[in-house]
Amino acid sequence: LTTSVYELFLFGGLTDQCFNFLSTTNLVMNQWSTNTVLELFDPSGTIYFLRTRVFETPPDAEFYLTQLVLGTTSIYTVTFDAQGGATPTPASTNVTYGSTYGTLATTSRTGYVFGGWWTGVGGTGTQALSTTTVAITSAQTLYAQWIATATTTTLVQVPYAWLDQYPVLLSLASGDYEAMALADADGDGQLGWQEYVAGTVPTNRESVFMSLISLSNGVPWVTWTPDLGTARVYTVYGRTNLTEGTWGTTNASSRFFRVNVGMP
C-alpha cells in the first residue's frame, strides 16, 4: 500500500462499503502478508479484521471482510489496583488496541518488593509490561503483585535479610520468617523482633541491651550498648527514686535512668 489514498472494499454479509484512508496515520497495520489476518482502524477508531483476497500487488488492495468490529473504539481505560500498596500514580490510564501499554503506574508498599502489574490478583493471570501489546476489547483492571521482604505479624517489621543471618534459627522455624521473629530462640526473654530492634544477637543469651552510667570529667553520662547510631531512636528517661513517681524527662534530680530503643 504505497499511495496516499487507500480504498478498502469490504464484503461479506454487509452492503459493500468503501473507506478512504487519507494517510498512513489513519491506516494501522499490525500484520501484513497474503492470506493472513490484517487489523485495520478506520479514522473513527472502529476495528476491522480483514483477510487478503490474493488480488494484485499494492496499491490495488481488495479485501474480503471476515470479521467485523470488536468495538466501536480502540481506546480503553486501564485501572491500577495497588492491592494494599500506596495509591498508584496514575490511578488509571488509556491504552490503544494494537499498541503497547507504555508507561505503567508506580506504587510502593513497606516491607514488600513490587512484582509488577498482573491481570489477576496475587501475580496470577498475565503480567502486563510497558512493551506488552494491548489486546483487550473493554476496560481492564491490573493488580499489583507484592513480594514480602519483611515480617508482617510483628510489632516492628523485621527484614528477611536480617533473619537470614541466622540460618539455624530459620531452620528451627521450618523456614517460617514470621515464626522465627516471634520466637525467643536463646531464652533471654526477648523475642526475635525485639532482638532486631535492640541490635542484639538472637542466638546468644548473653547478648543483651544495657544502659550504663559513666563519668567524664566528673560529669555523669548515660550510655548504652549496643549503639546502632541513627539506625535507631534512643530516648533517656529519669526518676528520683524507684518507689514513687514515674519515668519522665531527665533533670538535675534524676538518680535512676532508663533507655528506650525504637525504630526511626
Image (cartoon, grey):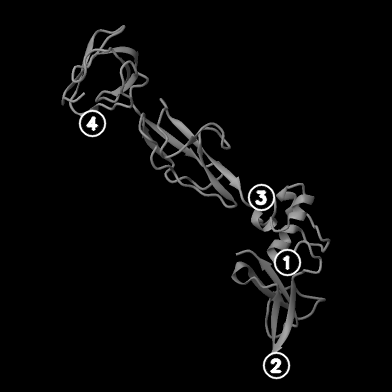
How much space separates mark 2 and mark 1, taking CA atoms?
Answer: 30 Å
Q: Identify the disc placed on residue 25.
A: 4
Residue 190 visible within the image: yes
Percent of width and height locating residue 39: 32, 22
Percent of width and height locating residue 227: 67, 73
Quarter of the image for residue 137 reads top left
Q: Nearer the viewer, mark 3 or mark 4?
A: 4
Residue 182 visible within the image: no
Instruction: Report whether 60 appears left or right of 181.
Output: left
Q: Identify the residue position indicated by label 1 in the image.
A: 200
Q: Identify the residue position indicated by label 3 in the image.
A: 152
Instruction: Report whether 48 appears left or right of 263.
Output: left
How much space separates mark 3 and mark 2, taking CA atoms?
Answer: 46 Å
The residue sitting at 31% across, 16% down in the picture is 50
Q: Earlier in the sequence, mark 1 or mark 3?
A: 3
Q: Identify the disc placed on residue 170.
A: none
How much space separates mark 4 and mark 1, taking CA atoms?
Answer: 66 Å
Quadrant where the image shows the N terminus: top left
Q: Nearer the viewer, residue 241 or 67?
A: 67
Q: Identify the disc placed on residue 218.
A: 2
Within 10 angstroms of label 1, few (less than 14), some, or many (20 or more) residues? some
Percent of width and height locating residue 216: 68, 89
Q: Earlier in the sequence, mark 2 or mark 1?
A: 1
